[in-house]
Amino acid sequence: MNINKSNKGLLVVISGPSGAGKGTICKELLNKNNFWLSVSSTTRAPREGEVEGKNYYFSTREQFKQKIDENDFLEYAEVYGNYYGTPKSKVIERLDEGKDVILEIDIQGALKVKEAYPEGIFIFILPPSMEELKNRIIKRGSETQESLMTRFKSAYKEINYVSKYNYAVVNDEVDIAVEKIQSIITAEKCSVERIQKNILSKEGLIHEQLYD
Ligand code: 5GP
């Protein structure tokens, strides 16, 4: 028996404060792996170059509220005045198909996913320093002075939530941060506890499944 075939996909949650570099890290992880990136819904207006269905599904507040009422989200959160949500059914389907899924979401959302799906891997991306975080938010250039200050102030508070996560990775250099995340994923796939939970406890055939 092929042990990988009966395995559920891994849910990898990349989270952390705005400006820590979650987006860049996710892009690199997607280039190097056969992951499925969940595209969120948001009520935020598209930024220049953003594409519907690729970066986000852009929706009105009314459309978003309807999806909340219909229980369509695995989690949703209000981030800096806009709503963001992760589509539930698509994520669950991909995981059931054995596909590894990546979510790039804010901290409130990640904590909600952890409650609903504790077997996920929760990785907190830290900036190398608060000064660097500020520079990155400024460089992005898409924020007004006010929203820049809001994002920076919440980042200070948000860093405290690192203790709720399974792993913390400092994003000093993207390549190194990505390598560390790859190692985390590899280790998780080899975790006996995970293998037991996912496969072996279902069948009760530890030896046969590993060696058939
Ligand atoms: P931005 O407006 O810069 O694209 O995203 C703002 C914040 O919302 C980022 O921290 C981003 O990770 C987060 N975010 C994006 N999609 C989701 C989502 O589906 N749920 C939650 N909770 N946060 C999200």
Image (spheres, grey):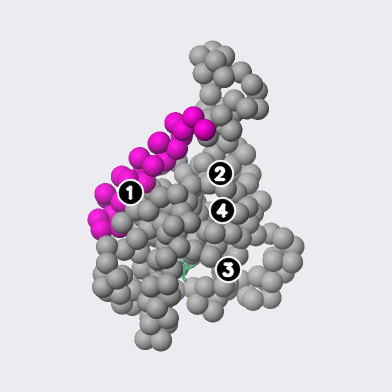
Q: Quadrant of residue 41?
A: bottom right
Q: Determine the residue positioned at 64% across, 21% down.
A: 204
Q: CA distance from mark 1 to mark 3?
A: 26 Å
Which is more N-terminal, label 4 or label 2?
4
Q: Amino acid at mark 1?
A: Val
- Which mark identifies residue 114? 4
Mark 4 near ligand 1 (CB under 8 Å)?
no
Which is more N-terminal, label 2 or label 1?
2
- Which mark identifies residue 77? 3
Bin the neighbour count of mark 3 within 10 Å (Cα to Cα): few under 14, some 14-19, many 20 and up: some
Where residue 27 sits in the image (x, y, percent)? 38, 54
Q: Say if the magenta span includes residue 58.
A: no
Q: Which mark lies nearer to you, 1 or 2?
A: 2
Q: Can residue 57 be seen in this snapshot?
A: no
Q: Amino acid at mark 2?
A: Glu
Which residue position is annotated with label 1?
Answer: 178
Judge by depth and name the residue closer to the eye, 58 or 4.
4
Q: CA distance from mark 1 to mark 4?
A: 22 Å
Q: CA distance from mark 3 to mark 4?
A: 14 Å
Bin the neighbour count of mark 2 within 10 Å (Cα to Cα): few under 14, some 14-19, many 20 and up: some
Highlighted magenta segment, given as a residue range? 171-193
Which residue position is annotated with label 2?
Answer: 119
Q: Secondary structure at mark 4?
A: helix
Task: Tell me which secondary structure the magenta stretch mostly adopts.
Answer: helix
